[in-house]
């Protein structure tokens, strides 16, 4: 019998550490490259749009010498590569310039409005997952039935109908006609100047303050836009849940579980859905990121004071610093959520950790 090499554990440890370092280095390179690409795209957009940021600041009637001086101060007289370097340095330091519309630093405005967008997207994602997952399971279990066709049609409508049209229709029916929900805005004007938010998430702040009157008012304002986004999210989540469940229900372990006499409820919810939940984490994360970046029309229709409405108003007033700053923030959040979903997928699925 050959004697084992005592240096083998140390070698294995070094190989494991080397593999871990390579994985971390690759992860950092991917993040840096993606973020640099995002900054390059936003910089290019800011230079090709037919809006002069200098004239937006000083006005159309400013003297030529003033325009030229401001252009030099902002660095727009430099070559594009130097402008891009300055732009990247500013973004990495959280400096997106000053908003022409509000005269505040863009990052200050974003900190003020972004919690509203996050709250709306979070509630919408919860609604979408709460209804989308059971509907997707139902459609998969009863494949080809009337229930399956109804779920698929409901999801198709969610994909096809313009979200701004649904928003206007919801306001007309549930606010103007029935009076079941409050109108545009985030909070009633009665509470707007007496309510002091702590986290920026009004529902959570009302709970922390134990002010149930404000909580009911905030909930009545968020229910319509969040349900609209939740319906859009539900269409995606239900379709993907159905696909994942159909794949799991065709696996051999399901046949074995049925042969053992396990109940259908336990097989579906305890085994098939449990395994389908791993890729569903990624789906829900992507749905959440999609609501964060795609709520511009919803916020505009419902006058929701979030980042989408902020970007829309800034674009209408040629405030390119605010538009590009908001775009970079949304892109950064989208990248972060994608990376987080990938990490969670690897943590939940042992097969990916072995690769």
Image: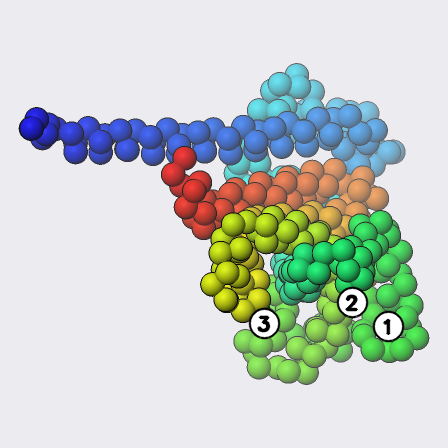
Question: In the image, residue 165 lies at what x, y percent?
Answer: 89, 56
Of all residues, the one furthest to the top in this rendering is 79
Mark 1: which secondary structure?
helix
Q: CA distance from mark 1 to mark 3?
A: 26 Å
- Few, some or many residues within 10 Å of mark 3 (<14, 14–19, 20+): some
The residue shown at (19%, 28%) is 11
Left or right, residue 28 beside residue 43:
left
Q: Earlier in the sequence, mark 1 or mark 3?
A: 1
Left or right, residue 85 beside residue 308:
left
Q: Nearer the viewer, residue 156 or 42?
A: 156
Q: Nearer the viewer, residue 206 or 271?
A: 271
- Few, some or many residues within 10 Å of mark 1 (<14, 14–19, 20+): some
The residue shown at (84%, 44%) is 316
Quick one: quadrant of the N terminus? top left
Mark 3: which secondary structure?
helix
Q: Nearer the viewer, mark 2 or mark 3?
A: 2
Residue 74, image quadrant: top right
Numbered mark located on residue 205 in the image: 3
Mark 2: which secondary structure?
helix
Residue 60, image quadrant: top right
Question: In the image, residue 264 lies at what x, y percent?
Answer: 57, 66
Q: Which residue is mark 1?
A: 174
Does residue 60 appear anywhere in the picture?
yes
Q: Nearer the viewer, residue 299 or 200?
A: 299
Question: In the image, residue 271 lies at what x, y percent?
Answer: 51, 59
Question: In the image, residue 256 lies at what x, y percent?
Answer: 49, 56
Q: Which residue is mark 2?
A: 224
Q: CA distance from mark 2 to mark 3?
A: 20 Å
Q: Nearer the viewer, residue 329 or 321?
A: 329
Q: Earlier in the sequence, mark 2 or mark 3?
A: 3
């Amino acid at each position: 019998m050959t004697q084992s090499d005592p240096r083998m554990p140390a070698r294995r440890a070094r190989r494991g550490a080397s593999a871990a370092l390579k994985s971390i280095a690759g992860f950092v390179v991917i993040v840096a490259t993606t973020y640099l690409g995002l900054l390059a795209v936003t910089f290019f957009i800011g230079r090709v749009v037919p809006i002069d940021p200098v004239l937006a600041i000083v006005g159309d009637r400013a003297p030529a010498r003033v325009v030229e001086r401001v252009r030099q101060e902002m660095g727009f007289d430099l070559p594009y590569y130097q402008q891009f370097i300055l732009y990247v340095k500013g973004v990495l330091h959280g400096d997106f310039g000053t908003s022409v519309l509000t005269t505040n630093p863009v990052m200050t405005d974003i900190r003020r409005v972004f919690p509203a967008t996050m709250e709306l997207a979070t509630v919408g994602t919860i609604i979408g997952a709460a209804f989308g997952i059971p509907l997707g399971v139902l459609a998969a279990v009863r494949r080809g039935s009337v229930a399956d066709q109804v779920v698929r049609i409901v999801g198709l409508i969610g994909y096809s109908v313009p979200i701004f049209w649904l928003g206007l229709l919801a306001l007309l029916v549930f606010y103007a006609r029935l009076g079941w929900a409050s109108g545009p805005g985030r909070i009633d004007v009665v509470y707007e100047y007496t309510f002091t938010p702590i986290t920026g998430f009004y529902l959570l702040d009302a709970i922390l303050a134990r002010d149930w009157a404000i909580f009911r008012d905030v909930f009545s304002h968020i229910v319509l836009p969040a349900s609209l986004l939740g319906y859009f999210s539900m269409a995606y989540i239900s379709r993907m849940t159905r696909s994942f469940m159909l794949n799991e229900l065709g696996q051999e372990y399901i046949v074995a579980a049925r042969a053992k006499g396990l109940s259908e409820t336990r097989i579906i919810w305890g085994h098939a859905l449990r395994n389908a939940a791993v890729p569903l984490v990624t789906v829900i994360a992507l749905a959440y990121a999609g609501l964060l970046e795609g709520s511009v029309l919803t916020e505009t229709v419902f006058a929701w004071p979030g980042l989408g409405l902020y970007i829309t108003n800034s674009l209408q007033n040629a405030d390119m610093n605010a538009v590009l700053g908001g775009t970079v923030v949304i892109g950064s959040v989208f990248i972060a959520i994608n990376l987080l979903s990938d990490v969670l997928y690897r943590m939940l699925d042992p097969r990916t950790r072995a690769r």
